Every structure is written in structure tokens, then in C-alpha cells.
Amino acid sequence: LKRRWFNLADFGLFEFGAGFSNASATHYNLPAFSGAPTEIDAAAEQYVTTTIGVERTGGLLQHHINGIFGYDIANSNGYLGVKAKFMMSGTFGFEFRIFTALMYDQGATPYKKDTYMVFSPIFRVNY
């Protein structure tokens, strides 16, 4: 659920979003030559998320910058993050994401332990 609240002049539209997700997944480790998978973890996740940000569309330069907070009710852990996407004419751009865990659980899978960053170049073909 996302809603655009008001205009911040040339900077874009202020937006706020909230959501809930429920997932149950099992992660396995499959060694290259042994053939027998081992279970890493099996957990249900119930996330409550909120986002707050600014989005500007149209014109030569577009941007979408969001702050994100997520909390897993089932496992009592959460994360904070920032997502930023910048585009030129809706064709070329890049996306940058950085997330950090609120609680450093040593038993968590590697991508949930600490801080991680993602940088993605974007090339969109519009036809």
C-alpha cells in the first residue's frame, strides 16, 4: 500500500507506504559433488514494512529515493535501509540499495547478518 501525499515542488512527490508479508521458505546447501542437500534453515517470516520517500517522474532526470524499515514479527529481527534510483530520460540510470540489520543474529543466514549493499546499472528499452 503506497500513497503519494503532497508535492515538494521540483524535488518530487512525498510518499509513504506500509505493508505486511508472510512467507515460509526452507534454504538448502547443495555441495558440488556430494549430492545430498543439507537444510540451512526453515523459518516462517512475517514482515511489517514501512517506506517513506520522494519520487520525481517525467522530464530529463527522474529519481526515486526511499527510506525503509522492516521488522520480522516471527523471528524478532529487522532491518533499516535506503533505496535510491536515478534515471535519465527513463532509459539509462542506476539503482543503489543499502540495508543493515537491527540485531546481529549469529545464527542467521549470511545475507541477514550484517550490512549489505547493491549497485545495479539500468538500461531500459522503451518501445
Image (cartoon, grey):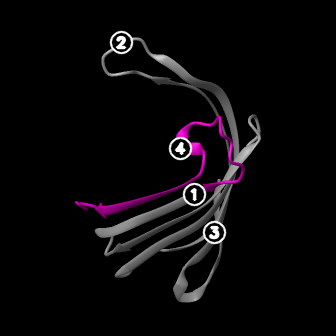
**For the residue marked with disc 3, what is the amino acid?**
Glu
In the rendered structure, which disc, 4 or 1, sits on the residue that comes first in sequence? 1
Residue 93 appears in which quarter of the rendering?
A: bottom left
Determine which residue is flagged by label 2.
35
Residue 95 left/right relative to 108: left
Front position among marks 3 and 2: 2
Tell me which numbered mark, 4 or 2, is placed earlier along the sequence.
2
**Element class at badge 3:** strand
Q: CA distance from mark 1 to mark 3?
A: 20 Å
| Residue with the mark numbered 4 | 111
| Residue 35 in the image: above or below residue 109 | above
Asked if residue 18 shows in the view, the reply is no
The answer to the question of whether label 1 and label 3 lie on touching residues, with beta carbons closer than 8 A, is no
Image quarter (top left, top right, bottom left or bottom right) of the C terminus: bottom left
Q: Residue at x 53, y 19 (%)?
A: 39
Question: Mark 3 or mark 1, which is nearer the start of the sequence?
Answer: 3
Q: Residue at x 65, y 34 (%)?
A: 107
Would residue 63 be seen by someone viewing this image from the given angle?
A: yes
Distance from disc 4 to disc 1, alpha carbons, whole Å, reads 10 Å
The magenta stretch spans which residues?
100-127
Labels 1 and 2: the sequence-earlier one: 2
Task: In this rendered view, identify the residue nearer to me: 70 or 38.
Answer: 38
79 or 68, which is in the foreground? 79
Q: Tell me whether the residue at label 4 lies in contact with that at label 1, contact meaning CB atoms closer than 8 angstroms.
A: no
Position of residue 3 measured from the top left corner of the image (x, y, whole percent) = 65, 63
Residue 50, how many percent across, how many down? 69, 57
